Image (cartoon, rainbow, N blue to C red):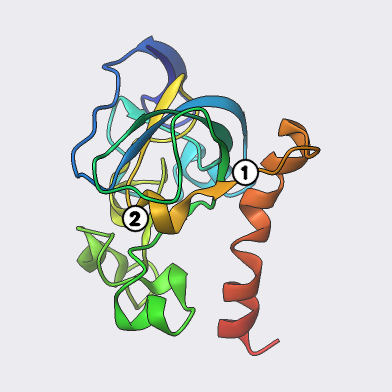
Amino acid sequence: MRALCWNGVNDLRVETVADPKIINPRDVILRVKLTTTCGSDLHFIDGYIPTMREGDVIGHEFMGEVVEVGRDVKKVKKGDRVVVPSFICCGSCWYCQHDLYSLCDNTNPHAEMQDPLLGYPTAGIYGYTHAFGGYAGSHAQYIRVPHADVDCFVVPDGVTDEQALFLSDAAAAPDGHGVAGV
């Protein structure tokens, strides 16, 4: 498949990369229908966020169509249009159970890298450095979504793909406002 890859400071390239595969029975594979660039992407493009690796697929604001479903996924099915928030949450850890999804304990295998950056660990984020889990991003034809029953929101009929795309940010807003005490 084709994907937008980081290859160094101010060096992005469209490259051919391997298609994503179901790794866990709770995963789905989406055909990315729409993706957009976030202002935070400028930080690693300009070299201000470390832990990017050459060839990393970037992007974390997206919506798409489910094309493959892991055997344990119950809430979404092949053909569903879904929007996915940028952070990846398990739905079962203490933080997720207390609606603090961006602090999920179980989705960032590299959380220790965040201490020098943030001073605390956070959830994994698609296409946003290895400090945030090293997950492949959404600027690609396909993407693997772990914990699909928690992280995929079915887009209802009557909502356009363009409208749904902007909901990927809206899913993060209540968590951010709660942490900030707003």
- Rendered view: 8 above or below 96: above
Q: Which residue is mark 1?
A: 38
Name the quarter where the N terminus is drawn. Answer: top left
Q: Residues within 10 Å of mark 2 (few under 14, many from 20)?
A: many
Q: Residue at x 30, y 43 (%)?
A: 27
> Judging from the image, what secondary structure is the residue with disc 2 in?
helix
Report the disc number at residue 63.
none
Report the disc number at residue 132.
2
In the rendered image, the residue lying farthest to the right is 158
Q: From mark 2 to mark 1, how far is it between C-alphas?
A: 15 Å
105, 12: nearer the viewer? 105
- State left or right for residue 61 relative to residue 74: right
- State left or right for residue 137 relative to residue 43: left
- Can you give x and y, in whole percent of width and height, for residue 86 in the image? 50, 51
Q: Residue at x 32, y 42 (%)?
A: 135
- In the rendered structure, are the residues bearing label 2 and label 1 in contact, judged by CB atoms less than 8 Å apart? no
- Can you give x and y, in whole percent of width and height, for residue 58 in the image? 44, 34
Q: Residue at x 19, y 44 (%)?
A: 24
- State left or right for residue 110 relative to residue 2: left
Q: Amino acid at mark 2?
A: Phe
